Structures are given as structure tokens and as C-alpha cells.
Image: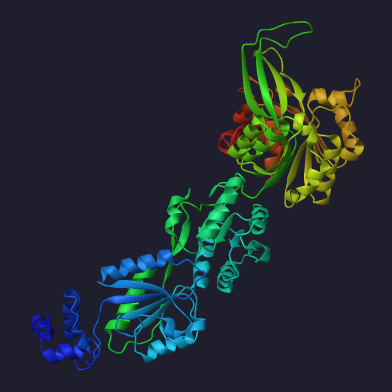
Amino acid sequence: MNIKDIAKLAGVSTSTVSKVLNKKDRDISNATREKVLNIVQEYQYVPYSKIRKNTYIRCYCLGVFIADIHFDYTELIYNIGKAASKKGYSIIVNYLKENWKQVKLLDGKDIDGIIIVGNTEKYRQIITEIKIKQIPCIIADFSKQKNVDAAKIIYEEEMAAYKAISYLIEKGHTAIGCVVSENPMINKGYKRALYDNKIDFDDANIFKKDITTEEGQESLREWVEFKNTAVLCEDEEKVICLYKILSEKGMLVPDDISVISLKDSKYYELLKPPVTATEPLGKSIEEEIVSLILKQIETPFPALEDVYLPIGIKERQSVKLPDKWQGKKIVVVGSLNLDISISVPHIPMGGEALIATGTTLIPGGKGANQAIGAAKLGSKVYLIGCLGNDSDGKELYANLLKYKVRTDGIEYENTLSTGKAYINIPAIDEGESTIIVYPGTNRALSRSQIRKYDYLFDGAKYCLLSLEIPIETANYTASVCQKKNVKVILKPSGVNKISEELLKKVTYFVPNKKELHLLIPGDETIEEKAEKLCDMGVENVIITLGKDGCYLKNAEYARYFAAADFESVDTTGGADAFISALAVYLSENVPLIRAIGFATYSAGITVTRQGVQPSMPDRIALEMYQDMITDSFT
């Protein structure tokens, strides 16, 4: 193959071929030029070395040089190679050196053009020399570089951030955080999207610490406290770190929090769920890069034009509409037990031996029950408590994660075993269950642990407090809630005396009938004893009466409510289901009477099956009775 053969195949003269190969083809039409170049490319024509030294002949090879050694461009360069191969070109990859003499293969003979990947601010001299040598060159970077004398492919991070945040807002999110490096362009796009949608900016929503350090990761654990319903991550490193921390906290993507990435990655398809990310529309970044460099190579006098890539969203499964209940935060401070339930014909009398008809081991404890009950109804629930460093403790912890309870406040105690509750469940119509509690590690829940995790109370609507823990810990917890404007719902289980100091810090006091008579002995009626509790400083007294419903006493009401019409199988968790539902609906500003209705039906559903936590209803199951609740509780 020689120049005459090319001329013959193209149907032109040898002088025309020579002009095209030497870029002296101003007077030659575009159609003729393309015909000649296509034949040269198809036959990979390379003249004798003597001729090559004096003429510009293509060798169909591109030099790809990395300017930023601190960034991983492996995937980008791999895809550039694939895109170039489709056009008949190969690539040579190297790092750009500040000293021009150290850069090899740039004499214009071994490569046809240069692609520089990354920020070239400190390589201006090299780019100037490339221009002097008349070597086609483009720069591929994700930022706007000024005063760089080369054509640029620009994927604007500011616009990408704007698009990502706008997408989340379109999905219904208004509390949006960012996990980014110190990148002013991303921050600018984030702020502009909030401003355009009339959403207030809070600098605390931008997490900028180094997540490669233990300190940075610990800070991220504290930052992800569900103030935000969605998070924008800068890149795959931050996405993977965030996914790991969310998993540790028992939080699900996108059910609990939506995640979107500024830069796409092939690894996102491997995560569960796959990650939504911004992406260039039309051609891929790599195809645009190759297209622009070939335009520089094949055009006689190319303009130094910049190409701004249009940006879109690559939807996967990590973003969803926020639940209408999302963001209602509840803290539970209480016990965690392993419930050992024993089914018996009736509650045994003194000296009586019974044969049990069945036994089950189920996670329980009033703290855990109430936390799971509220979590199943859609609230963001944080539980503070103690577990033993034993198999029972590990099982209870895993169960909390299963129901999406936040376990930041859980600690393990090495010197005690996990608490247990021994529950005698009589046959239907043979009376209520009886419970014997072994506190175990629950007695280790201390003031210092509450103090350590007091940040969990920030922004909470309610604290559910039960007294299967040390009374001094409960008193301190109520004081923390008072300072942080968190309303307390107190269940007085396992005690026969409560100080007026504690009662004055309680917004809702929810004893059952037996607990009421134990705390206030005497012959007074339920109404009179409820009145006494109000006189002691409690704002609202709600006495649960099992199959007889409940009684409410406060400054406005003195009223009985009937129980929901369900057949009871196991009454163990009825009160916990009542309290958790009451807290959830009150936190959503549902009026008290109607909230009691939801609480009553939640308790009714729960007692129809054995076991507390699995029997508690989720939001959909409970709101099936919304019309009945509306009719009866007004």
C-alpha cells in the first residue's frame, strides 16, 4: 500500500492524497478529505520512516495523560479506550509530568492527539508547548478551568449537584444533606437548588470531614441522625461508606433515607439497592471525549471549542418519595428482655403444679416492645438500653435492626446476663397473663449512659419511659427531656412508689388498673385516683383497663373509652402497643382523643396473637380501622 494505491481507491490524484496527509487541504472539499482519510484509516496506512519524519501521518494512537494523581480515573480511562477502539484508535496511558522533557511519546509522530484527564492548572507550560508543536489536544475535567488554551470537555459539578438536589426535591424531599469534599462547585449547585425551591440552607447539612479516618466515620455516624430524608454523595467512596454506616444503624435505603451520587460508577449496580446517580445525556463522557479529540485531529483548522455535557439522572432504586410520616422522632428509654412465654390452662395458685401446653422464646421488654411498636408505625425510633454480652443479647439486638429501630444508644454489659421475663399465659377466658421479670442488664442502664447519648433527644417529639430500669436513671432521663422540650410518656411498671418530682415532668402517665392501685392504695375509685395524679402535677392520666378499654383524665376530659372488639389470645403486649401508637399519632399532631382511638385499636390487634413484637400492627394494618376510629373517638 502506497500513496498511489490510496489515490486510486479514493478516485483522486496523488497530490490530493499528499495534501490531505500533510494538512495542506484548504482547497479540498470535506467529502474528498473524508474519503481519503477513511481509506487511510481502513488500511492503517503508514509510510516509510524516511517519509514519516517529514510529514504528518496518522498512526491511530491517542495519548491519555493523567494530571491528578490523587484521583482514580481507572474506569474513565478504560471506557475512553473502548470508545477509541470503536473509531479504530488505540490509546497509550501515562502520568503527566511537570517537566516537559520527562513526557515521552509527545513528539507528534507516535501519537495523533493528546487527552489530558484532570485539572491542568499547574501544567500550563506543557499545554503551551503542545500547542506550539501543533499536536491536537483536549482536556477532560469535571470543573471549569479558566485560561487554558485547549479544547475542553466539561462536566459541570455545579450543574450536576443542582440537578441531583432538584431531582430529590421533585421526589418530595426538603431535608437534604450532602457528603462531599471541600468542593465549592458542588456546594454552589446545592445551595442554588435549595434557593430556587425556597428551601432554607443550613451549613450543618453539609458533611465535609475526611471519611477515610476513624474520626471522620464516627462523625458521619452522628451526622446521619435523620434530620435529613435524603443525602447527596460526591462519589462512590462516600456512597459506600454511607451505605455501611446506614446498615450498621439498621437504616434502609431508600425506605429510611434516599441516596443519590454526583458521579456514576459501575459498582453502583452491585449495591443493594443500586444507587441513583447523575449522568451525561446523549453520548457518554468517554464518547464525547473521543469525538472531540478526533475532531481536533481530523479538522484542518479546528476551533478551541468547549463542550458542556448535558446532565441527567440515571434512576436506579436508592431514591423514593419520603413517607408522609417520615421525620417524627421518638426516643425510648427502657428494658430489653428475652420473653419466655408459658401457655397454661390457668394461672397457678399457691402450691399448684401445672402442665404447660406450650412455650416460646420471643424478644421482649417494655423498652424494646414500645420501640418496635412505634417503628412499625413509621416513626424514627431510637432506643437507649443495655444488653448482656451473650447469645440472648445478640439475638435481641438483631431483632431491633430487623424492625428498623436505631440502636445508637444500646450498650453491652459484660458482668450481667440479658434480662428475662417469664410470662404465664392462661387459656382464653381464663384471665390476664402474669409476668415475672429478671432485670439482668436492665439494672445497668445508668445516668452516665443517658448523658452519653443525650444528643439522641435533640429534635425528638416524645420519649417513652418505663420503670423496669433504675428509678434514678428514669428521673435523670425525664430531666433531660424537660431541658430539650421532649414530652414524656411514662409506663410505671414494676414499682409501688413514684416521686412527685418525676410525675411533674411527665406529660402522659399510663398505668394499668393494678399499677394505679399499687401506686395509690385505698378504696377510692379510678376517677378519684386519676384526679390525685393530676393534682400531683401530671398533665394527662390514661389508665388502661384491658378488655374494659381505658380512662382519660386531664384538665379538659374525664372520659372512658371502650376497648376495640377483638378476641384476646395474649394480653402481654397490649399496653406497650397502646403507648407506642399513642406516641406516634400524637407526634404527628393528631388530636388526643383520636390518638387514643388508634392506640386502642393497636392494642386490640396486638392481643389477638401470642407474642408482642410480631403481633404489633404496621401502619397499613392499623389504618384499615380508620373509619371505625373516626366514628368512635371524636
Position of 69 compared to 502: left or right? left
Is residue 262 something one can see in this rendering? yes
Nearest the eye: 358 or 565: 358
Could you tell me residue 411's position as x and y percent? 72, 40
Total tally of numbered discs in the picture? 0
Asked if 554 appears above or below 485 in the picture, the reply is above
Q: Residue 358: which quarter of the image? A: top right
Q: Is residue 613 above or below residue 424?
A: below
Image position, residue 305 (x, y; %): 39, 84
Residue 634 seen anywhere in this rendered image of the structure: no
Where on the picture, by quarter, is residue 357? top right
Which residue does the image show at 47% across and 66% down from the upper left?
A: 72
Give the x, y percent position of residue 514. 81, 22
Q: Is residue 69 left or right of residue 457?
A: left
Against 363, residue 453 (above or below) is below
Who is closer to the viewer here, 459 or 60? 60
Is 548 in front, or is 407? 407
Q: Residue at x 80, y 47 (%)?
A: 451
* Left or right of 233 on screen, residue 489: right
Is 247 drawn above or below residue 496 in the view shown? below
Which color mode does the image show? rainbow
**Split into 4 quadrants, where in the image is the C terminus?**
top right
Tell me where residue 447 appears, x and y as whole percent.
83, 42
Residue at the image point whose x is 83% and y is 34% from the top: 470
Residue visible at 66% across and 9% down? 345
Q: Quadrant of residue 347?
A: top right
Query: Where is the N terminus found, in terms of image quarters?
Result: bottom left
Q: Is residue 473 left or right of residue 141?
A: right
